[in-house]
Image: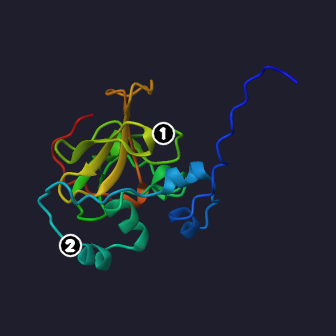
Amino acid sequence: FSNATFRVAPPPLRPALGPTAKLGLPSIPFLGAFFGTSSSSTNMTYPLQKGKDEWQAQLSPEQFRILREKGTEAPYSSDFDKHMPSEGVYTCAGCEAPLYKANHKFKSGCGWPAFFDAVPGAVTRHVDRTFGMERTEIVCSNCGGHLGHVFKGEGYPTPTDERHCVNGVSLNFNKNDPVKDSKA
């Protein structure tokens, strides 16, 4: 009928069958990438060393999935997203190392706790090339627990123009601030 060139359409995307199904979340490929896991945090050396069995005994299944398997919690699922104290410190749920001061937290509207800076030396950055993109992963400098990702240049009115997008399940909160060095 026509001289048009036809291409065979790629096969339809299949629903993610993995961590998203276990969470009771819709099995939509996009969400599968969001809530999936990648390799564990064992390729770097950190001061606190524990084996997989020790971490599994200490952490809840969700904490283990996020901190040790680099998972991501569902947006708006953490009470820490809207938790806005004027003082105190957020610590690593894996090792209690101080990570973020309360006055570094800001409302980003992204669905995860957001901070514009970390306690000096508390967070280590790594290039993350999962899911076909390049991002900056942040981990606890003491135990290597996955915290989330840091994004730059989004235009938030913060001193650093950075957003540390942190999984709330990877955090605890201490209303007493043991960190003396403060960046306002």
- Looking at the picture, tell me which residue is in the foreground, 56 or 87: 56
**10 Å neighbourhood of mark 2: few (<14), some, or many (≥20)?**
few
Up-down relation of residue 104 to residue 122 (above or below): above
Quadrant in which residue 153 is drawn: top left
Residue at left offset 26%, top offset 42%: 126
Residue at left offset 34%, top offset 46%: 102
For mark 1, give the secondary structure: loop
Contact, mark 2 vs mark 1 (Cβ under 8 Å): no
Give percent across and percent down for residue 122: 20, 48
Quadrant in which residue 62 is drawn: bottom left
Give percent across and percent down for residue 131: 45, 45
**Residue 66's mark?**
none
- The residue type indicated by label 2 comes to Gly
Q: Residue furthest right?
A: 1
Give percent across and percent down for residue 54: 24, 77
- Looking at the picture, tell me which residue is in the foreground, 90 or 161: 161
Would you name the residue on which mark 1 appears?
A: 107
Name the quadrant of the C terminus: top left
**Residue 51's mark?**
2
Q: Earlier in the sequence, mark 2 or mark 1?
A: 2
Residue at left offset 56%, top offset 64%: 17
Q: Is residue 137 left or right of residue 23?
A: left
Q: How many marks?
A: 2
Q: Is residue 77 left or right of residue 130?
A: right
For mark 2, give the secondary structure: loop
